[in-house]
Image: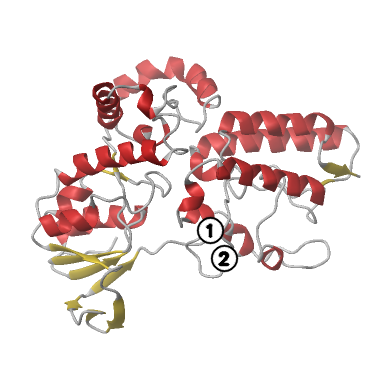
């Protein structure tokens, strides 16, 4: 790793990588400057270590656990609360929020009230709870208003909330500064520091660029893939991504991909999603071989139908209101569109399995 002890460091970006770096560098560096564009609405991780004895006690239940995991919305052993926010009294709502908060992990994000991501007023209740819990951990009023503002920067959960262990506690340290670059932009990076719009200069010896990446589609478009006519995938997707079932693409017979565009990807537990897709791909290949086929290839009509479904699911939610990497909005020039299937891993698997029964949506040769 990089030894920052005794050094002056700058961290640009407060996505998941930024949060993780701040938690570590802030404790070791001589000085740490965090350049924040958007507050990370981080949730408490509450990570614990399980002893070998505890793990052995749990192992007999793993098969049932893994089976149930695949039958949930996000491929995790938690499910959304079967109530709307305002079905509960303020007291009961506060108690439920508190329970999810104390449980730690992503429960407050993905296992909350069912209308949290379809109703702005309901969503605001969750944000206000998050802000109260977070603001009470931050001592400096200036840092507090930058990191956990009273007004939400976007609907809660429409940008990925990171899991933190002591991120907000580290921000309290006297050697840690926070700069709001929406109000005070970075104008120049010099050999020995960073200059901002208001004329401030922050001397640094090392900079961590935690500024994100081309999520969801970038891993495929950067591979140099070309279709049967020689057209690069990156060129085909310049105006928007298309796929069928989030695993196949017209013009690429017998090509399968996982954990990418138009699948539950960013709204699911990665291993759960990949397991669902991997099993389907294996069964598809076995069926191809068993049927004496040479290849399968999705039709353009099936791709359009699938993309329309992805968009329809997204349009029912608050996600289109936010410029996020879920929507491809973090990359200049990239089309702004929903890149994930929001119907849940359980329904996604059902839809994929139905298509496999009779090769619905595929040309077979």
Task: Indicate whether 313 appears above or below 22.
Answer: above
Tell me the residue that label 2 is attached to. 334
> In the rendering, at what x and y percent does residue 9 appear?
21, 69
* Residue 292 at least partly seen: yes
The label number, if any, that marks residue 246 in the structure image: none
Sequence-earlier tag: 1 or 2: 1
Secondary structure under the numbered disc 1 in the rendered image: loop
* Residue 247 at least partly seen: no
Tell me the residue that label 1 is attached to. 328
Q: Are marks 1 and 2 in contact (CB under 8 Å)?
A: yes
Secondary structure under the numbered disc 2 in the rendered image: loop
Task: Indicate whether 28 appears above or below 45.
Answer: below
Task: Indicate whether 33 appears above or below 296.
Answer: below
What colour scheme has been applied to the protein in the rendered image?
secondary structure
Q: Is residue 132 left or right of residue 65?
A: left
> In the rendering, at what x and y percent does residue 98 appear?
25, 28
The quarter in which the C terminus is drawn is top right
Residue at 46% x, 30% y: name it: 76
10 Å crowding of disc 2: few (<14), some (14-19), many (20+)? some
Front residue (pair 109, 220): 109
Residue at 68% x, 48% y: name it: 307
Q: Distance of mark 1 from mark 2, alpha carbons?
A: 6 Å
10 Å crowding of disc 1: few (<14), some (14-19), many (20+)? many
Q: Is residue 364 left or right of residue 300?
A: right
Give the residue furthest to the bottom.
191
> In the rendering, at what x and y percent does residue 107 appear?
37, 32
């Amino acid at each position: 790793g990089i030894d920052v002890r005794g050094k002056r460091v700058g961290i640009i970006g407060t996505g998941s990588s930024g949060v993780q770096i701040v938690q570590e560098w802030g404790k070791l560096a001589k000085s740490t400057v965090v350049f924040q564009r958007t507050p990370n609405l981080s949730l408490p991780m509450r990570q614990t270590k399980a002893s070998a004895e505890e793990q052995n006690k749990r192992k007999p239940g793993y098969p049932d656990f893994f089976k149930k995991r695949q039958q949930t919305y996000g491929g995790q052993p938690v499910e959304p609360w079967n109530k709307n926010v305002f079905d509960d009294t303020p007291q009961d709502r506060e108690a439920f929020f508190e329970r999810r908060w104390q449980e730690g992990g992503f429960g407050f994000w993905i296992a909350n009230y069912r209308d949290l991501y379809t109703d702005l007023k309901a969503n605001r209740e969750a944000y206000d709870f998050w802000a109260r819990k977070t603001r009470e951990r931050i001592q400096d009023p200036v840092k507090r208003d930058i990191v956990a503002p009273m007004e939400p920067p976007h609907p809660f959960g429409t940008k990925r909330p990171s899991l933190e262990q002591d991120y907000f506690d580290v921000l309290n340290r006297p050697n840690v500064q926070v700069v709001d670059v929406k109000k005070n932009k970075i104008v120049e990076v010099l050999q020995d520091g960073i200059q901002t719009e208001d004329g401030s200069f922050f001397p640094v010896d090392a900079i961590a660029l935690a500024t994100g990446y081309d999520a969801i589609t970038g891993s495929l478009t950067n591979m140099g893939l070309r279709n049967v006519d020689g057209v690069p995938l990156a060129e085909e997707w310049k105006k928007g991504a298309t796929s069928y079932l989030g695993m196949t693409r017209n013009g690429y017979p017998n090509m399968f991909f996982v954990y990418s565009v138009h699948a539950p990807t960013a709204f699911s537990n990665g291993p759960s999603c990949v397991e669902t897709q991997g099993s389907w791909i294996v069964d598809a290949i076995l069926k191809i071989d068993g049927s004496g086929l040479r290849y399968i290839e999705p039709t353009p009509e099936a791709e359009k139908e699938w993309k329309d479904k992805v968009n329809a699911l997204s349009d029912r939610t608050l996600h289109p209101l936010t410029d996020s990497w879920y929507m491809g909005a973090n990359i200049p020039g990239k089309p702004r569109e929903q890149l994930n299937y929001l119907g849940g891993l359980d329904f996604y698997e059902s839809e994929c399995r139905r298509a496999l029964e009779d090769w619905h949506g595929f040309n077979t040769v």
